[in-house]
Image (spheres, helix red, strand yellow):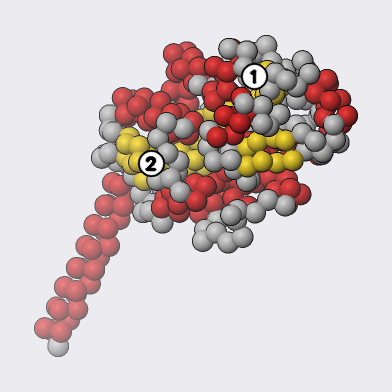
Amino acid sequence: MKVFRSKQLWHSMLLVSFIFSALISSAHAQNSPYPQKPVKVVVAFTAGGTTDILARIVAQQLTEKLKQSFLIDNKPGAGGNLGTEIVVRAPADGYTLIVNSVGPMAVNTTLYSKLPYNPITDLVPIVQIADVPNVLVVHPSVPAKNMEEFIAYAKANDGKLNYGSTGIGTSSHLSSFMLAKRAGFDATHVPYKGADALKDLLAGRIQFMFATIPSVMPQIQAGKLRSLAVSSLKRSRSMPEVPTVIEMGLPNFEAGSWFGFFAPKGTPDIVITTVNKAVNEILSSPAIEQQMVVQGADPVGGTSVQFGQFVQRETDKWRVIVKESGAKAE
């Protein structure tokens, strides 16, 4: 009987010791500085694009600030869905993050009939990096020097103008669709893959399009394209002389690209707060701000809560616009 009780007591002591050790380990993990090893930052698009460029600017600074490497890993495909799903399925330990954009986070849930994940619930917003407004550009043959003249010209040639985009359901497509719908004219959408849209705009085969500022800045400066308005709420720091669509008479018109950090659902709070704080400090640097402005980006920052609320508003907005446009991913 005494032997049985001794064994029972010994087992109980082992159990208590195990639980205590586990609690100590958990507390130690929560209180340990982050990061303790290199962090993989997935970019769901090809190298050299806007998402990739902005991610690399910030990742380099995070590496210096947090004393661990933040390594960019490009995983393009399916409009950003491939890379996004990789991060959704990754361990929620803070060592796989993603810099993502408006398409995969706010548009694709409606554009694609079936996604194997929900970006709103399966990813945690950390911090917004930047806004990149689209700019409305026209071929010089279009006799319009401002938005008012362009809308009048489009209405006078209702259904005769063609606009290009970088693909169905992209920001460039939906921005032009919004403009035509709100201004009250019809135009034909011609979707392209990548830079082919710009080539045909320069050749005059299409008459107008919304494009990211960096992609058309050289052509605007060379007089090969004419800029009429930007799609952001405020004028872009990259093109302060160009008015917004709102200024030109279409209220609440906002249709640009944006970029930010996300983590898998369940990622520890210390990761979210550490990365958020570091990125906000990085974005406050005048040198980094200027580097981004050159890329056509307006630095944002803010809290993770603010970013989450923004992403939800964007998702709600684009759901309506995608349905109105009838766009479906091919």
- Residue at image x 27%, y 62%? 19
Q: Residue furthest bottom?
A: 1
Dot in front, 1 or 2 = 1
Give the image location of residue 91, x and y in percent. 36, 54
Q: Which residue is mark 1?
A: 225
Q: Residue at x 63, y 45 (%)?
A: 169
Label 1 sits on a secondary structure element that is loop
Whether label 1 touches label 2, CB < 8 Å: no
Foreground pick, 324 / 90: 324
Q: Which residue in the structure is indicated by mark 2? A: 74
153 in relation to 110, above or below: above
Is residue 270 in view? Answer: no
What is the x, y in percent for residue 241?
67, 11
Q: Residue at x 46, y 17 (%)?
A: 291
Image point 59% across, 50% down: which residue? 108
Query: Which badge, 1 or 2, comes first in the chain's sequence?
Result: 2
Element at badge 2?
A: strand
Q: Amino acid at mark 2?
A: Asn
